[in-house]
Amino acid sequence: MLRNRVKRQAFRPGRRRKSKAGMLLSIVFIALVALAALYFIIPNWQHAQPEWKSMKKPIFVQGEVMKYSASGTGDSLKLPLPVIQQEIDPNIRYEKKTESVIITTSKELVHLTIDHKDAKLNNKPIKLLFAPVTEKGIQYLPISLLKQIYGIEWTEDKSTGAVIVFKAGEEIQSAKVSGGSSSDTVSLRERDSIHSPILQDMTPGTAVRVIRNEGDWTIVQMNNGYVGYVSMKNLTLTDTRKVPEVKGIPNIARQKWNSKKVNLTWEAVYQKQPDPSTIGNLPGINVVSPTWFQIMDGSGNVQSKADDLYVKWAHKNNMQVWALFSNAFDAERTTKALSTFDNRLRAIIQILHYAKLYQLDGINIDFENVYTKDGDNVTQFVRELMPLAKEQGLVISIDVTPKSNSEMWSLFLDRKALGEMVDYMMLMAYDEHWAASPVAGSVASLPWTRASVERLLTEDEVPPDKLILSVPLYTRVWSEETKDGKTTVSSKAIGMKKAQDIVKAFSLTPTLDESTGQNYVEYTENGILKKIWLEDSFSIKQRVELAAELNLAGVASWTRGFASSEAWEGLKEILK
């Protein structure tokens, strides 16, 4: 018993040492907890300056500071072109060669020249209060003009130089800082934390604009440009208003077709004008498109083959005339003619002049064989044409090929942008197998046609009520000749009536080719195998049903001269 008591006593000093260490650890822990608690309770009172303070005239859009500063002040305030393109209109174009700025909207074509107050609106002279300028390689446009065109609003703060821009249609939620006495301040912080540095001390009653809410914090902007976080409890919402939208003008020409389907046929005009008296009836056709106009040279001049007698015949038979305007399928000529505003405008003014002279109802644009690099100029040409054509009451349509990897025939077309501008887009759904195709095949098989239409509807978001399915009234007789074990393929385009004549002459029995959805015949002539995928009443019916199923705007057919009477009977079903 004595030994045990001695042992217990021997360990007591060690226990005291451990107890002291534990107490120290406890004290340290309690101190850390207290410091942590203080961290969460005590806010950061440090102040910071935003990076934009180094800018002379910072620009803000929806709370975001722009890369470039504004220029001037008051009535002479100007905005840099890169900011306008980024935030207001990406389609404003600057052409360095002529120092021209071109602005297009659905109703306006504005042409400005750097350092000049003289400008043109829809090709009519106007006088600007302030000229556009170039500073350090950047173009600046007067904000007063931008307000007139785009309906923007702005504020300018004299103390910071901040320019706050509001876009048409933007909703502005106003608020006031709330708090205790007038001597109290509310902190505008860099981040959503009381430990974030303070940007500004705001007195109660300070007016701010709400950008957005993030949890218990709200991002606001002061009139002096400062943007930061405020606790929601320190804000009182006041009024909300919307910046007025810019009023457009009604497209009267397009509105006439809103409740009707288009049934157009092209009239191929070569050396000789068609004699209307020999054409006969075209049951169901409500638009004809004669191939009358083309770009004549690199300056944009337009060549005309228009015929007043044909227009009068069409109108007498209740058909509109949407004359075709092409680039002559000349790539080099197209590059030059569309390269500058002056050349494009020359072509536009001339084609509109002819439209007025011959009392045309519309223009059908058919630009093909174009370098991919010129695609933007094709789109710009249409963009510049539209407001002037609308002013004249014309329907504007454009022909596009099915999407493919062909540079000259497909890749240059910005179908999405074009679909947003034009009244109608004609999908030329033919030449799946073209004249020089290395293999024989259908001009336009039904599966290929459907896929071509659906790609425009889904990938390019072309509205179905703008898309017109263009169908072939021709086919090809394919010849396959084998010599020395090698087969060569050639073809010849023929119309529907000629194809039926061949069927009768050779006593052929068409069979349905399931893969193409068309009737098919083949025969041998002079030892050469001939193949024809027929365009007939059956194929026309399939295409019209496809257009109706997808609720397209109508159908078009190339070309009247290839048609048989059964073609018109089949095509007019789109009107039902």
Image (spheres, grey):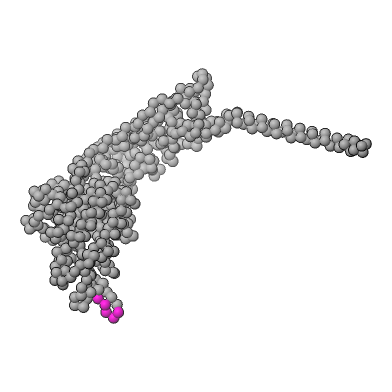
Image: magenta residue range = 481-485
Counting labels gives: 0
Q: Quadrant of the N terminus?
A: top right
Q: Quadrant of residue 19?
A: top right
Quick one: 92 or 571, which is closer to the camera? 571
Decide whether residue 504 is among the magenta residues: no
Decide whether residue 483 is among the magenta residues: yes
Quick one: 256 or 62, which is closer to the camera? 256
Residue 410 position in % (x across, y down): 30, 57
- Extreme top residue here? 181
Quick one: 294 or 415, which is closer to the camera? 415
Residue 316 position in % (x across, y down): 8, 48
Residue 122 position in % (x across, y down): 23, 41
From where the camera sits, is residue 484 visible?
yes
Q: Residue at x 21, y 69 (%)?
A: 521
- Extreme front residue here? 1
Q: Residue at x 21, y 43 (%)?
A: 258
- Extreme right residue here? 2
Q: Residue at x 27, y 48 (%)?
A: 464
Q: Is residue 464 left or right of residue 159?
A: left
Residue 62 position in % (x across, y down): 41, 35
- 62 shown above or below 519: above
From where the camera sits, is residue 343 visible?
no
- Extreme bottom residue here? 484
Q: Main secondary structure of the magenta part?
A: strand
Q: Residue at x 12, y 53 (%)?
A: 283
Q: Is residue 111 left or right of residue 56?
A: left
